[in-house]
Amino acid sequence: MDLQYKTIHPVKYLHDHLEQDIRPDGRKFLSFRPVSINVSSIVQADSSAIFKLGDTTAVCGIKAELATPKADTPDHGYIVPNVELSPLCSSKFRPGPPSEQAQVLSKLIDIILNNSAALDLRDLCICKGKLVWVLYCDILCLNYNGSVIDACTGAMIAALKTLVLPKVNYNKETEVTVVHPKNKKSFIVRTFPVSVSFAVFEKQLLIADPTDDEEDLSSGRFSIVMDDEEKICFVHKPGGIPISENLLSKGLEMAKIRAKLVRSVIDAAISTLNVNDVEINA
C-alpha cells in the first residue's frame, strides 16, 4: 500500500514524511547514509575502487598508458575521466551514446581534479616532449540513487591513491622505451577532495545526502567539494531556488565533518588493501 501511494502521489508521499520531520528512508533531515569502500578489486585495472553511498554505487578503474604529450604542455601527462550511466544503474537511462548527465558528471570530475590540485600532471612526465603517462579513469555507476557525484568522486580518488606505475626508461637517441614492471612506484595524490551533496526544499529546508527521489522532487540542490585542509575546491549548484547565506554556511560546516569521515574510511580501506569492506555510519 505504501509503495502504491508513493507511485501514484510521489510529491505528497515525500511531503507527508517531511512534515513529520522524517525522510522516507527513516533518516533525519541532516543524516547521511553509510559509506563503504573496496579497493583493488578489479585485477585487470592498474588500480580500482568501489564506493557505496547507501544504495548508490560507483566503481572506478584506472588504466595507465604511454603517450606523446600535448604540444602546449610538453612536460605534463594527462588524465581522462569518463563517467558512464548505463541502464544497469537506473531505468531513467537508455542504451546508446553517453547521456547529457553522464557528460556533465565527467566534466565535473575533471573540474574537481583541476580545482583541488589533487594531481600534479608533471608527475606523469617521463621524457619532456616525448613520452608521458595518460590515465584513463573509467567510472561506472552500478546503482543510481542520489548523490552520484559524491560516489564518483570518492571512487576515483580512492583508485588514484592506490595507483602504482612501473618505472620507464626512454632513450632520446634511439627512441627506445623500456618498461620495468617489477619496479613500481606509488602515484602521489597531493590533496584529498571529497564531495558532499545536499538538497533544498521549500522554506529553506536542508536535506543531507539526498536520494534520487529527493533530488527529483527538491526545489534545488548543491554539492560542496573540500580538500583535506578544509579548503573549498568547488561548489556545484545546478539551478533551482536561491539558497540563503545561513543555509550555505550550515552546509559548509556539515561538509567539513562529513568529508573528514569519508577520508578516514578511504584511508582505512587503503591501509588494509585486503579487499575487505570498511564501513562508517554518519
Image: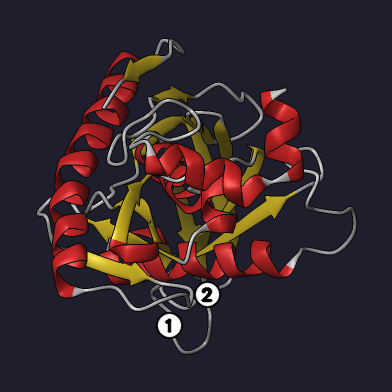
Q: Nearer the viewer, residue 28 or 175?
A: 28
**Residue 22 visible to the viewer:** yes
Picture residue at 70% right of the left edge, 34% below the top: 5
Question: From the image, which quarter does the C terminus lie in?
Answer: top left
Q: Which residue is mark 2?
A: 69
- What is the crowding at mark 1: few (fewer than 14 residues within 10 Å), some, or many (at least 20)? few
SS class, disc 2: loop
Q: Which residue is mark 1?
A: 73
**Tag count in the figure?**
2
| In this picture, residue 282 sits left or right of residue 18 | left
Q: Residue furthest right?
A: 96
Disc 1 and disc 2 in contact, CB within 8 angstroms = yes
Picture residue at 28% right of the left edge, 49% below the top: 189
SS class, disc 1: loop
Question: From the image, which quarter does the N terminus lie in?
Answer: top right
Picture residue at 41% right of the left edge, 43% below the top: 18
| In this picture, residue 99 sits left or right of residue 169 | right
Q: Quadrant of residue 28?
A: top left
Query: Residue 181: x, y in percent?
Result: 51, 33
**Colour pattern:** secondary structure
Q: Residue furthest bottom?
A: 72
- Residue 282, relative to residue 222: is it above or below? above
Query: Residue 143: x, y in percent?
Result: 65, 35
- Residue 34: mark: none
Give amino acid for label 2: Pro
Alpha carbon separation for disc pair 1 and 2: 7 Å
Give amino acid for label 1: Thr
| In this picture, residue 241 sits left or right of residue 58 | left
Query: Residue 178: x, y in percent?
Result: 54, 47
